[in-house]
């Protein structure tokens, strides 16, 4: 018997960043199940082609007004009502909410479609992130209150809560008296190395040097990591250059002069392929750092901070080396000369590829729908 699934996400857009990578990975895992008829809905201004576009707020004022109605991110009243109408009409067996920011939908789904089960996937603890923004900008307190309310509704009233790593699940237990949760690690679609190796993409002479690669968009924890690399690590390197790529970070070129900041690139594969090692000195944020899974996919070793390595406890050293102290981080990077064979990619295939998530995701669906 086929079951109908509605997959609702804030991150099904054409960008290439952590949340989007995970959202697409989970969607593809659902779509791989022949017993499921999965329809995707994107609450984003630039949705992927295979998703139904849901109307969004158009500016900060519209978003703030929606927050007053307990709607988060770019979900506004028009999109909210459209989602409820289609759920009421189609009566799906399951709604997969790809964010705790959709918690406000759950009580209304119960009203319009009583048999529908609801799964909520927590990419991270959103209220922690928004609270940090609110401390610097009072404008975000409205968003924080809406975020907190949605997170609470998601944790308390979803039929199943799924987290991206164990630490977030344990925190939800304490914050909201959550009884149980399931965990699905960050997964990303595989890029066939044989295809990528034939692509010149953004290759240029800068990649002919010995360099470590940092990948991250213009997001506060990534900028904090760039500051660490620029101020604490790069000045102590004798042999190794640091190159950073990511959407929006090019505006920091004049600020972080010890790091070669490339900004957005059309093809990231050449940067991974020619890198000595990937660096991920993250000290704040939430969820899992998806770029580490991407590094493993490209068969690269990683040097990460303790915080940045959360969720990758199954990956042994020296595939992922965990270092927090700046001097030791720089020393290890400058001395890095490891031949890891195919071990990084083997870890990717085992733990972070779409295939690795299908069994865990399938069990969650089966438990709810049987």
Image: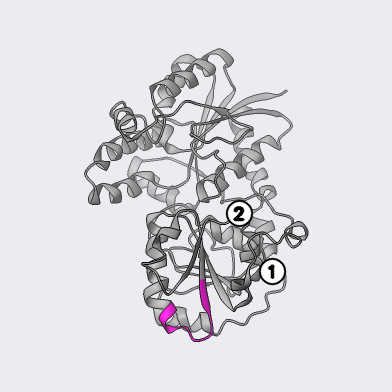
> Which comes before the other along the chain, label 1 or label 2?
2
x%, y% of residue 62?
A: 33, 29
Asked which secondary structure carries label 1, the reply is helix
At 34% from the left and 44% from the top, the residue drawn is 127
x%, y% of residue 122?
A: 46, 43
At 38% from the left and 67% from the top, the residue drawn is 254
Which segment is the magenta one? 234-242
Magenta segment: does it hold 54? no
Which residue position is annotated with label 2? 266
Asked which secondary structure carries label 2, the reply is loop
Q: How far apart are marks 1 and 2 (CA)?
A: 27 Å
x%, y% of residue 63?
A: 34, 32
Which residue position is annotated with label 1? 343
Residue 362, can we see it?
no
Magenta segment: does it hold 238? yes
250 versus 85 height, above or below: below
Instruction: Judge by depth and name the residue closer to the eye, 172 or 245.
Output: 245
Quadrant showing the C terminus: top right
At 60% from the left and 54% from the top, the residue drawn is 266
x%, y% of residue 368?
A: 58, 30
Quadrant showing the N terminus: top right
Instruction: Judge by depth and name the residue closer to the eye, 14 or 118.
Output: 14
174 versus 365 height, above or below: below
Q: Is residue 91 left or right of residue 307?
A: right
């Amino acid at each position: 018997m086929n079951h109908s699934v509605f997959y609702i996400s804030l991150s099904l857009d054409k960008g290439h960043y952590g949340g989007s990578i995970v959202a697409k990975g989970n969607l593809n895992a659902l779509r791989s199940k022949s017993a499921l008829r999965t329809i995707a809905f994107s609450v984003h201004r630039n949705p992927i082609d295979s998703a139904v576009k849901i109307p969004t707020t158009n500016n900060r004022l519209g978003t703030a007004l929606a927050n007053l109605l307990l709607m988060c991110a770019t979900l506004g009243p028009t999109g909210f009502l459209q989602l409820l109408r289609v759920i009421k009409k189609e009566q799906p067996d399951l709604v997969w909410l790809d964010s705790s920011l959709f918690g406000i939908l759950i009580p209304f789904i119960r009203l319009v479609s009583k048999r529908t089960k609801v799964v909520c996937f927590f990419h991270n603890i959103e209220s922690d992130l928004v609270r940090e923004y609110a401390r610097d900008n009072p404008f975000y307190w409205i968003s924080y209150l809406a975020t907190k309310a949605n997170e609470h509704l998601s944790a308390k009233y979803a039929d199943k809560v799924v987290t991206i790593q164990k630490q977030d699940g344990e925190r939800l237990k304490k914050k909201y008296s959550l009884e149980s949760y399931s965990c699905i690690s960050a997964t990303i679609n595989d890029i066939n190395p044989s295809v990528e190796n034939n692509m010149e993409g953004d290759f240029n002479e800068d990649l002919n040097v010995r360099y470590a690669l940092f990948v991250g968009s213009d997001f506060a924890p990534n900028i904090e990591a760039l500051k660490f690399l620029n101020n604490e690590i790069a000045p102590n390197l004798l042999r190794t250059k640091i190159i950073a790529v990511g959407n929006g970070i090019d505006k920091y070129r004049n600020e972080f002069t010890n790091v070669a900041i490339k900004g957005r690139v059309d093809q990231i594969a050449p940067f991974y392929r020619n890198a000595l090692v990937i660096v991920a000195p993250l000290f704040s944020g939430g969820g899992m750092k998806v770029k580490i899974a991407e590094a493993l996919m490209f068969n690269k070793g990683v040097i990460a901070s303790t915080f940045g390595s959360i969720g990758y406890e199954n990956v042994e050293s020296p595939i992922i080396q965990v270092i927090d102290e700046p001097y030791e981080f720089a020393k290890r990077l400058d001395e890095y000369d490891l031949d890891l064979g195919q071990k990084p990619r083997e870890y990717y295939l085992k733990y972070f590829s779409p295939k690795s998530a299908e069994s865990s995701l399938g069990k969650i669906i089966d438990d709810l729908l049987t």
